[in-house]
Amino acid sequence: MVVPSSTTPARQEIATAAAALQLPAIPTVDMSAPRGLLSRQVARACAEQGFFRAVNHGVLVPGPAPAARQLDAATAAFFALPAHEKQRARGVQGQGPPSSPLGYGCRTIGFSGDVGELEYLLLHANDPAYKAASIHAHDPKHFSCVVNEYVEAVKQLACDILDLLGEGLGLEDPRSFSKLITEPDSDSLLRINHYPPSCTVHKLDHDGQCKLKGTACRAKAGNGGNPTGGGRIGFGEHSDPQILSLLRANDVDGLQVLLPDVNGKEVWIQVPADSSAFFVNVGDLLQALTNGKLLSVRHRVIASACRPRLSTIYFAAPPLHARISALPETVTAGSPRRYRSFTWAEYKTTMYSLRLSHSRLDLFCVHDDDDNSSDVSKEK
Ligand SMILES: C=C1C[C@]23C[C@@]1(O)CC[C@H]2[C@@]12CC[C@H](O)[C@@](C)(C(=O)O1)[C@H]2[C@@H]3C(=O)O
Ligand SMILES: O=C(O)CCC(=O)C(=O)O
Ligand SMILES: [Fe+2]
């Protein structure tokens, strides 16, 4: 159900204040709602905001040691290691098809000069053993198992959401989206981001490679009239390139999404932290597959809390060779094809040549002077 946030008084107060200021609300979807209603609500949130908070999703079920809790414990322990030990988990640039910066990273994001006040682990969902010996020297096998268990659980939730979207959009095959991410050679990633507290000075390195320092109240977002309110850029403005992203974080704020207000002006909206929820966002590929009906939302992290933020994001992606073209049902005379067909490998290569904030899907737009008059039947 798309409802105003309501699980805690603080969240309710924020929702009320936002409504009074006529700020856009973050939709909350109760995943235990009846299916017909649920599919319409998921589709609506993804079409209007490209983003929603999923509650009652059943993934973090209480138990002796659920994968999420074990993963959080293992990654928090890794980030607490001395800098030189973490450096052992650094990936090799150029490794992976086509080069993804897998492994440990600190401040540097991608290959084009972007930086943020964070450190992270980037893992391939199909290769949980990569760098496990450096990440969890004590028991690498256990670490890989925990990653694998978490990936399986979150992939299931991603498939459920994609199937709901397929149903909500009335697709001929409602499983068209989920099929892409369940291929054995899918290119999905798991990212764990660790943002140090911003109120104290932190030097996480000693060798000049990686310095995370408290520089609170100085940074401004490179975003025109959208300053960061005194916080530092943890992870700069961007859209996620894949199909769907599922984010879970501890109870520390920082995530913001760019949404239109009542006058259509885009404003940064703070997403109140909720460690029991998954935050779901549409990626560029899903926008392309739906011919722009679902929106790949722009988001960022502003680090201004006095406690570290730990977030874990599953990026559901298709295999590299998958061809991405708008599904035929989404292309009509009134809504002609917006993007040319491309493979995920081609998109990935393009995105790694660009800065984080680039609106890269625009490069794949079909131009007015391109002949797309008979497009409803083209490029299936
Ligand atoms: C600068 C970049 C980092 C990024 C690849 C890119 O060229 C543009 C997209 C970035 C992003 C955002 C979502 C994920 O965190 C990520 C792993 C992804 O697939 O695309 C990162 C990339 C990255 O950090 O390598
Ligand atoms: O760490 C977060 O909370 C969000 C980071 C993010 O957007 C990303 O890694 O793509
Ligand atoms: Fe992101």
Image (cartoon, rainbow, N blue to C red):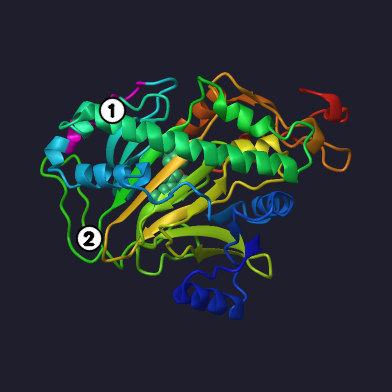
- 172 sits to left or right of 177: right
- 185 sits to left or right of 42: left
The magenta-colored residue range is 86-95
Residue at 35%, 64% in the rendered image: 231
* Residue 256: percent from left, percent from top: 47, 59
Label 1 CB, ligand 1: below 8 Å?
no
Residue at 81%, 24% in the rendered image: 378
Mark 1: amino acid = Gly
Residue at 48%, 31% in the rendered image: 188
The front one of 172 and 265 is 172
Label 2 CB, ligand 2: below 8 Å?
no
Magenta-drawn stretch contains 93: yes
Mark 2: amino acid = Gly
Q: Is residue 276 above or below residue 86?
A: below
The front one of 7 and 89 is 7
**Secondary element at tag 2:** loop
Check residue 158 in the rendering and tell me which mark sits there, or answer none. Answer: none
Residue denoted by label 2: 214
* Residue 131: percent from left, percent from top: 26, 27
Residue denoted by label 1: 91
